[in-house]
Amino acid sequence: MASAAPTSVSKLGNDRMLYDETVTRVAVVGGTHGNEATGVALATHYLRNPVSVQRPSFETSIVIGNPAAVKANRRYVDKDLNRCFLASDLAEYTPANGSSTIEVSRAAEINALLGPKLNSSTDFILDCHTTTAATGLALMMAPDDALALEVAAFLQSQDGSVRIVLWSLGHDWPMLPSIGRCGMTVEVGPVSIGCCTAAVYTKMHWAVQTALDYIDCRNTSLANGAVGIDASVQFFSKIGTVDYPRHDDGTVCAMVHEDLQGQDFAVSLSAQPVFRKMSGEAMVFDLTMLDRVGGPVSVDGQHAEAVDAVNASDLVPFFVNESAYYEKGIAFAVAQLGTTTVRVFKGL
């Protein structure tokens, strides 16, 4: 188990919020993926009831991420909008010079509205998503984002079922929240694509409202000279993904095993059956199945950029059998459990 959050990476041109800075502008985004109806419903509710997201110490903007995809009830029209926000990509396209795809154009528009990335006008972004996987409420963020981890730690202190997930190690990330100085993905599941359920909506609504309340409380505490207190936080650090087994021609030849289905964050991958072949045989997890950013881990489980040396007993699955990830070659993502200490403000 890792004992501290990774600190060896930082955002390009690091413009992260400092510990003693107050937040002045927040954005809540829904519909980054057009068929994730819960985020769309929540953002639409806020647009109709803007007072519900306003707080005394900062302003809040509401954005529908991908209106064209929402209208089509599709995840995206041409390409995944939530993979269009690398700084290097954003530098190549702007609303003025146009784009060949709807999502690239929309990424430029959002960057102009909420960013620009690396010199952002938005201090904190909450990007609302759902998944077909049984993640529960999971808050996902860059590993160097101290404010996002602080906000997530408070939510976890209010509800012990909240999972905190750190994106893979790196210096830049293509997800929408990365255009803000700080931010997170609010992920809730399971729910079918294109479907909004009361239980999932309620979790997402609670997470956004509680995050806004905490940021307001934090601002007030800082203005009054208060000092936060240390809190122990459990997090999951994403270290890679596992693809479906495939035939030589690339077609999938196995399904997620029934003992893994619905067990996001809940089981160790050590000796865990993870696939069942179409012919009926079970396949047990092996480290050679694991692909990391930059390549697979070695057979002995070592990797120079890992939070700790990788051991299957320390690894858990999440985004298990997520329907949108079939096209990405991902049967499930893999994370390593860790704990760290975060300074938070109390007083809500």
Image (spheres, rainbow, N blue to C red):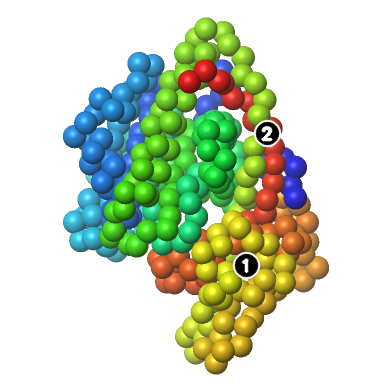
Gap in angstroms between the C-alphas marked 1 and 2: 30 Å
Q: Is residue 164 visible?
A: yes
Front-lying residue, 197 or 275: 197
Total residue callouts: 2
Residue with the most extreme front position: 199
Per the rendering, the mark at residue 232 is 2
Q: Earlier in the sequence, mark 1 or mark 2?
A: 2
- Based on the displayed image, in which of its 4 quarters is residue 314 positioned? bottom right
Three-letter code for the amino acid on which mark 2 is drawn: Ser
Whether residue 179 is visible here, answered yes or no, is: no
Q: What secondary structure is found at the residue carrying circle 1?
A: strand
- Name which residue lies at 62% across and 83% down: 282
Position of residue 127 in the picture relative to residue 158 (left or right): left
Determine which residue is flagged by label 1: 291
Q: Quadrant of residue 327?
A: bottom left
Residue at 33% x, 41% y is 29
